Image: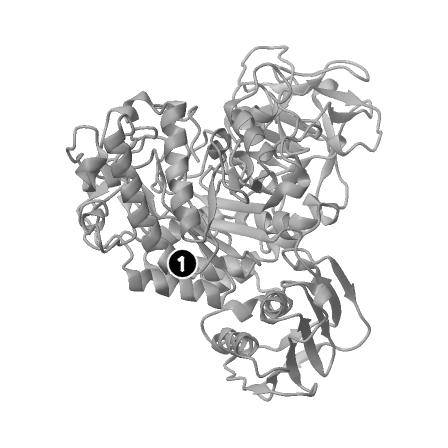
């Protein structure tokens, strides 16, 4: 979850608890994004990218008011997929397409066939479209549902609109064969720090399901709030649910049993499994404020509305309080398990600096035994690896690149050691590396919400990683978690900093967007990137291809009313790209950086993109068609210091030949930057601090630069 490195990097947060009344209406205008053009999504714009996709000969299929949705089965789940598709298409098309149960393949129809071969698996499907019909075939209803999401993307972007649109609804002639890389592809909502209403959760379910995500992890409890009603302990919601990060006074910031059942049922209709998380033994202040006997002094704490972590722990210092905690867990986990048809109960386990190893092991034992007694599988953060785990447990790893650097050294990070311990116990792993999969990490310095303790996470960084090397050395070797123990991936949206100006504490004047506005801005376009990481084989993924496909989804999100972030580096329709002006210059996912120096002669390096002034370069066109590159921090120009292999340095701008760069578009959206001697700007490697030099043209990917 949150690294101890965090401590929010603001010492004041450790001592300050800010209480603000939550306004009745907090939704305001979303940050502006480019006005979209109205192109149809091309067949190549599918996300996640299918395993196999071919354009076939023939004419496109046209959806009309006479089109039928033919389900080749009478089984309720398959028919329900047909009904879902009909209702999804109705608002934009204006058509009430009948769903018919048929034994044959009719013309002018969308055919849903759940009788495909077993080899397709539960989620695999094929899709074949032509003039007379579109046929989606799967081995069951779940595969049909995944195929229907692909069909939606083959239709024009306007199909996502909530109001009737006047246009032709066509599907290009294609043949697709598809199935997922991983069986677990999750999204997590932190409803504890910032409460999401049932309707807001449903909206997020629909958005995630559209990209073939199949698991909804609800972080139901934390220091700032308890969000699930437990009949036997009413104070958990009467007291524990009255607060959020920065707010107090709530009376309905929780889910009743009926609310929770509604979420579970809705997720099931989208073939998503709900994973409830009851965090412990830390992140428990809301429980400690509600149940006095969980505290060592048997006195209830004052409810917490702050922003720090590692501030709470169940009392585990004596037998009586350990028994109190165990009884509490039995009551809570049983109640939640009874409401949850899915196989997992997430028991947390992260960030407990105050706990001794014995206390931590006591919690894990109690939580595990209670969970398995309910015939549920234990899931938890990777810290669980330090304790004894039940067979078949599922761990969620959130380490980052700094941890990978320690693998195989005498100073392996705690995260790596705990992951190693979990792997040795044959636990399965869900990969959620914070520097790739945490959606609350800022895109760059201009992002109004979230944090950056794990670095800035632009879209490219969310996309360019491999779950099999998330616990490997930086060169990809020595993975702590074997590939066959990786169950999948999860995109985690934490919500403790869901307000503008999130680098500092909020004030009474701070703007708090609605939970949906925050979720959409931080999730789109990164959630689709992570969806492709979990679905598409590693060999089939390519950043340059992905960003072209991703751009075509902007108009879809606009049509659907999704307040996405128009992230730099994506060629969104309707935007005009020019070289002249201020840009970030990136190769291999790393940006040209002057290290924040203002000194003459400072050598340039590559570093993780942040779009700060140290990485902002103003391209100024010269009379000969070349450009000078002026750094915003220093006001100095990038200069080739010599021949092949020499460093790029910054010096006072003088327009001499060594400071002039020929910028040439490559045809794939990227550029080469050549010195007047014809040598190309080249990164030494795609790692932080890598040198930048000029070299002969070798065709290296690190000679290809995006100018965003």
Residue occupying image coordinates x 51% and y 74%: 84
| Image label count | 1
In the rendered image, which residue does mark 1 sit on?
Answer: 340
Residue occupying image coordinates x 31% and y 33%: 307
Q: In front here: 395 or 224?
A: 395
Q: Residue 652 in the image: x percent, y percent?
A: 61, 14
Relative to 22, is 71 above or below?
below
Please state if 408 lies on the left or on the right of 224 as rendered: right
Please state if 11 lies on the left or on the right of 208 as rendered: left
Q: In front here: 300 or 641?
A: 300
Relative to 35, is 433 above or below?
above
Please, which residue is most extreme toward the left here?
Answer: 299
Q: Please tell me in which quadrant of the rendered image residue 453 appears.
A: top left
Q: Secondary structure at mark 1?
A: loop
Q: Residue 601 in the image: x percent, y percent?
A: 64, 10
Q: Please tell me in which quadrant of the rendered image residue 695 appears.
A: top right
Please state if 450 lies on the left or on the right of 26 as rendered: right
Q: Please tell me in which quadrant of the rendered image residue 501 appears.
A: top left
Local crowd at mark 1 within 10 Å, few (<14), some, or many (≥20)? Answer: many
Asked whether the viewer can see residue 624, the reply is no
């Amino acid at each position: 979850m949150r690294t101890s490195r965090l401590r929010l990097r603001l010492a004041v947060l450790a001592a300050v608890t800010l209480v603000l009344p939550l306004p009745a209406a907090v939704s305001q205008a979303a940050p502006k994004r480019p006005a979209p053009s109205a192109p149809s999504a091309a067949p190549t714009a599918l996300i996640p990218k299918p395993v196999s996709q071919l354009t076939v000969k023939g004419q496109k299929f046209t959806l009309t008011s006479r089109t039928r949705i033919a389900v080749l089965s009478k089984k309720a789940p398959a028919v329900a997929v047909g009904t879902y598709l009909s209702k999804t298409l109705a608002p934009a098309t204006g058509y009430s397409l009948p769903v018919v149960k048929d034994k044959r393949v009719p013309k002018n129809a969308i055919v849903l066939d759940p009788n495909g071969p077993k080899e397709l698996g539960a989620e695999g499907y094929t899709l074949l479209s032509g003039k007379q019909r579109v046929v989606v075939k799967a081995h069951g209803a779940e595969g049909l549902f995944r195929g229907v999401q692909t069909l939606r993307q083959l239709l024009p972007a306007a199909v996502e609109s909530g109001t009737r649109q006047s246009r032709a609804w066509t599907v290009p002639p294609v043949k697709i064969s598809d199935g997922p890389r991983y069986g677990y592809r999750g999204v997590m909502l932190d409803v504890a720090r910032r409460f999401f209403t049932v309707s807001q959760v449903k909206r997020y379910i629909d958005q995630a399901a559209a990209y073939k995500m199949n698991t909804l992890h609800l972080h139901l409890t934390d220091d700032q709030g308890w969000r699930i009603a437990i009949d036997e302990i009413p104070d958990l919601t009467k007291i524990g649910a009255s607060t959020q990060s920065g707010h107090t006074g709530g009376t309905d910031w929780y889910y009743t049993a009926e609310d929770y059942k509604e979420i579970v049922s809705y997720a099931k209709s989208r073939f998503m499994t709900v994973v409830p998380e009851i965090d412990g033994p830390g992140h428990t202040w809301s429980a400690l404020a509600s149940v006095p006997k969980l505290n060592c002094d048997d006195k209830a704490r004052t409810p917490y509305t702050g922003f720090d972590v590692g501030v709470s722990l169940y009392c585990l210092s004596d037998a009586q309080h350990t028994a109190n905690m165990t009884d509490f867990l039995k009551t809570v986990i049983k109640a939640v398990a009874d409401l949850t048809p899915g196989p997992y109960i997430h028991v947390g386990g992260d960030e407990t600096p105050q706990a001794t190893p014995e206390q931590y092991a006591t919690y894990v034992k109690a939580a595990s035994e209670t969970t398995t007694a309910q015939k549920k599988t234990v899931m938890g953060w990777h810290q669980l690896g330090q304790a004894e785990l039940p067979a078949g447990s599922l761990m969620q790893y959130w380490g980052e690149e700094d941890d990978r650097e320690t693998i195989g050294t005498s100073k392996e990070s705690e995260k790596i050691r705990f992951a190693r311990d979990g792997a040795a116990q044959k636990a399965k792993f869900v990969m959620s590396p914070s520097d790739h999969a945490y959606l609350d990490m800022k895109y760059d310095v201009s992002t109004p919400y979230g944090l950056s303790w794990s670095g800035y996470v632009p879209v490219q960084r969310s996309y360019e990683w491999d779950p099999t090397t998330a616990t490997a050395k930086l060169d990809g070797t020595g993975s702590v978690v074997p590939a066959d123990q990786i169950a999948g991936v999860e995109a985690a949206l934490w919500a403790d900093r869901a307000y503008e100006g999130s680098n500092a504490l909020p004030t009474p004047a701070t703007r708090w967007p609605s939970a949906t506005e925050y979720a959409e801005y931080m999730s789109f376009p990164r959630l689709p990137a992570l969806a492709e990481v979990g679905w598409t084989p590693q060999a089939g993924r390519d950043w340059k291809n992905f960003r072209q496909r991703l751009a075509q989804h902007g108009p879809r999100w606009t049509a659907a009313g999704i307040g996405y972030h128009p992230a730099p580096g994506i060629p969104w329709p309707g935007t005009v790209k020019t070289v002249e002006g201020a840009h970030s210059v990136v190769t291999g996912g790393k940006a040209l950086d002057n290290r924040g120096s203002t000194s003459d002669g400072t050598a340039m390096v590559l570093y993780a993109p942040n779009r700060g002034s140290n990485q902002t370069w103003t391209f100024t066109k010269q009379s000969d068609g070349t450009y000078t590159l002026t750094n915003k921090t220093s006001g100095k120009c990038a200069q080739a210091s010599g021949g092949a292999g020499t460093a790029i340095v910054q010096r006072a701008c003088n327009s001499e030949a060594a400071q002039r760069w020929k910028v040439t578009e490559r045809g794939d959206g990227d550029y080469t930057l050549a010195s007047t001697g014809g040598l190309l700007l080249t990164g030494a490697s795609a790692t932080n601090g890598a040198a930048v030099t000029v070299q002969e043209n070798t065709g290296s990917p690190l000679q290809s630069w995006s100018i965003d």
